Amino acid sequence: MRTIIQALSLLLFSLLFIFATYKLPNWLPADIYLRIDPLLGLNAIFASREIIPRVLWSLILIGATLFIGRFFCAYVCPTGASIDFLDFLFFRKKKRPGLKNEAGFQKIKTGLLIVFLTAGLLGLSLAFFLDPLALLTRFYTFFLYPLTITLINLFLDLLRPLSRAFGWVALSYLHYFQPVFYMSAITLLIFGGIVALNLFAKRFWCRYLCPLGAFLSFISPLGLFKRKVSPECNECLKCQKACPMGAIEQDPTKTRFPECIQCRTCVKVCSQEAVTFPASLSFSLGGEYSSTNFSRRGFLYSVAGGMTFGFLAMRTPFTPLQSKHQLVRPPGAIPETEFLRTCIRCGECMKSCLTNTLQPCLWESGFSGLWTPKMDLRLAPCDQNCNVCGKVCPTQAIRSVSLEEKNHAKVGTAVLLKEMCLVWAQDKICLICDEICPYNAIVFRPVEGYRRPVVIASKCNGCGFCEKKCPVLGESAIVVVPDGEIRLKEGSYVKEAQKLQLEFKANPGDDKFILEESGFKIESGKKEEKKSQPQTPKGFM
Amino acid sequence: MDSHQRITRRRFLKTAAAGVALGVVGSPALMHAKEEYDLVVISGEPAAATKKALETLGGISRFVKKGHRVVLKPNMSFARTPEFGATTHPMVVAAVAQECIRAGARRVLILDHTLHRAELCLERTGIREACKNISGVHVQAFQDRKFFKEIKIPQGKVLDRVEVIQEALESDLLINIPVAKSHSATGVSLGIKGLMGLIWDRESFHSRFNINQALSDLATVIKPQLTIIDATRALASGGPGGPGDVKKTNLIIAGTDPVAVDSYGVTIVPWYGQTFKGRQVEHLLIAHQRGLGKIDIEQLKIFKGSA
């Protein structure tokens, strides 16, 4: 029963993950798992010092936990389900030594929780690092998703001779776009490490490390269902050994309620049928609740740890240099400082990105920018028919806005590097940047007897098609720099663009080869020499 | 061997005469006088004009035989809706596909190597939607190198080899259905420029080679049996991607000579505000000089009609 619910939850998580593409309908919250995560929510609210409407969804989980208890970890959490599944796959038959100081280790997660929340209060988003839902979404995005596509394409390749022979045309040419990401390896290492820890104890992660579990355990002893052992108990300690959370004490009639996730493994293994989980409204606020006996010393150490992290991460040159380095953020990203505080690094935006341009940062903006999304426009452009990154952002570090608005959320400006441009430097016939530009922001103007590309900054919203498609090898001869980006916390990008006199819709027919444009008159002497070559558009004679 | 199996002179002459007679009578050229036209230009609504153009050329069955595998190469390189004039009108493509199937084609594959993300192109251009209910017709964008095959260009001046979509090489019939548009490197983008959508390394045409020379090299190895220019609207500036000045021209231009068809296409609107002839388009002129087709439309027999 529990396994089925877990499997269904993991399936739902995976399906929502798959649905997170540019086609995502507005009514479907693909990021729902991340939204209901109160730890991510608190972290974002603390760090940004603001109430984020989407985060209020986490009240659902808080309410349910208050009412029922810490059921989330056993039934809903997709990370827990993955760990259980992989444990079954790899370590089923392993003899595990177990840890001696169970209760001591269990406090680690509480300590981590305090570290993260303290760091959050100091304005450093850190909870993402070990939050199970952010962690799993990252693992899915950076590892599982590209791997799955590779496997599917491999399968299709193997099937191809057969599809051709049978004339299944659609299948013969089916090929999925292969997404690629920086930091896939690191993400795999972290997740793999977490699974490997199961060698020591079942659900090692959930027992000792998970800060979300720690948060839920704070409020769980109030819940409706509680483990109860009847006098039939013969103290065989089977339940004590089987409990995946180490929630049963040496005296098996006693339960560490904050640790109990109501998985009912103890009910299953009991030969005396002595264990039950009756619904009881008797809120025993006294004894069990205080059993989260986190010492004052531990608390202070954790707070100090959080503050140290906060200090080390924020007091670096990266902070004054925020938005002064060459980082192009996704369209709709709120101002850089707030963005770094609010982003929970789940990777959902990068997964759903239509073109694969969104990539995780490593150290580009320091520790506080780890895994934040940036645009790698040499790799891929930003498509004007897609606004999914904002739609799936659970904390709205990237705002969810309409296509029209999103296309006005300028991310930067293209700059032509004339020494590298084939036309400027070598007089070659190249027009790819102009050809591909969706906004007619690149025009050809006659300079020195030759038509050369020029960027009109007020028409460029930084989508990067030019940078991506520039045929120059190595660095592109036209690059998008963050200069001119529009980062708004609220309000309309369209209006802001109007205010700044930007226009991201090309006028029909403005790509004429204008000779009389001010400042571009060609000297008459030169004109004769060159036989007025610029007067006919390129390609004509 | 029996003696009567030997071919006597008399017998040879008789047979030959009969053959010639049969040929003369049965010649489609005499049966459908229409076929003598070098070019067919029809004005009208996209689907109707396309059908009329095919009919005037002698019917699609002149090209499509029963069981043929046909490849149609429209321009669906940009994720733009038809009114931008950057991609071939979906109704034109669908009409050609429909006719091919009606003439007995085993299957029709509509393909392109798109510049924008493939699924968006297929969606936005409306071509997938327009063809989805015609059985035997498949719309496909080829975005992976494994679907391309390298061929040599024996007569290549700048290009000596090129990777081409394998399916286009192996089909029984290739029909090119470009859209009429301006192009900031080649002047106009019509049939011959449209062939670039069949190759893998499009960028090299801009960076490494003289694009006009490379295009005519390409035209020596990829020879569509039929070119149908969708000039129902013409993107007179801002090409090839648009947005730009879209002129409502309501024309379909069809013919078997790729240079002639393009050459006519050059004359239908002023490009970038100037009137040009085929000879003034560098890549067309080179193609003509290399014997790939006629360029002076004054010397062509052109059927003009409307649907």
Image: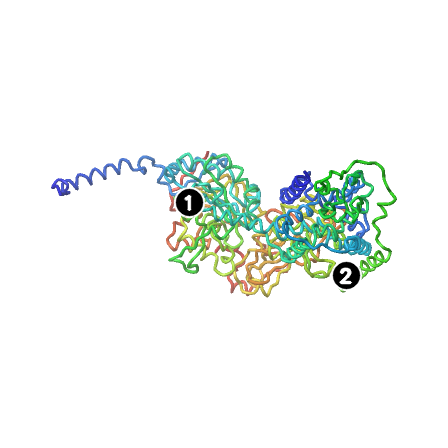
Tell me if I can see residue A183 in this picture: yes
Q: Quadrant of the N terminus of chain A?
A: top right
Image position, residue A132 (x, y; %): 71, 50
Q: Please determine whether, in this image, residue B244 is positioned above or below residue B26.
A: below
Q: Residues within 10 Å of mark 1 (few under 14, many from 20)?
A: many
Q: Please determine whether, in this image, residue A108 is positioned above or below residue B13.
A: below
Number of labelled discs? 2
Image position, residue B230 (x, y; %): 48, 42
Of the pair A50 and B248, the residue shown nearer to us: A50
Report which quarter residue B41 is drawn in: top left
Q: Label 1's element? A: strand
Q: Residues within 10 Å of mark 2 (few under 14, many from 20)?
A: many
Tell me if I can see residue A374 in this picture: no
Numbered mark located on residue A28 in the image: none
* Amino acid residing under circle 2: Ala
Query: Residue A302 vs residue B147: left or right?
Result: right
Way the structure is coloured:
rainbow
Q: CA distance from mark 1 to mark 2?
A: 62 Å
Of the pair B85 and A67, the residue shown nearer to us: A67
* Amino acid residing under circle 1: Leu
Q: Which residue is mark 1?
A: B174
Q: Which residue is mark 2?
A: A313
Image position, residue A302 (x, y; %): 82, 57
Q: Chain of mark 2?
A: A
Query: Residue A359 vs residue A163: left or right?
Result: right
Of the pair A497 and B195, the residue shown nearer to us: B195
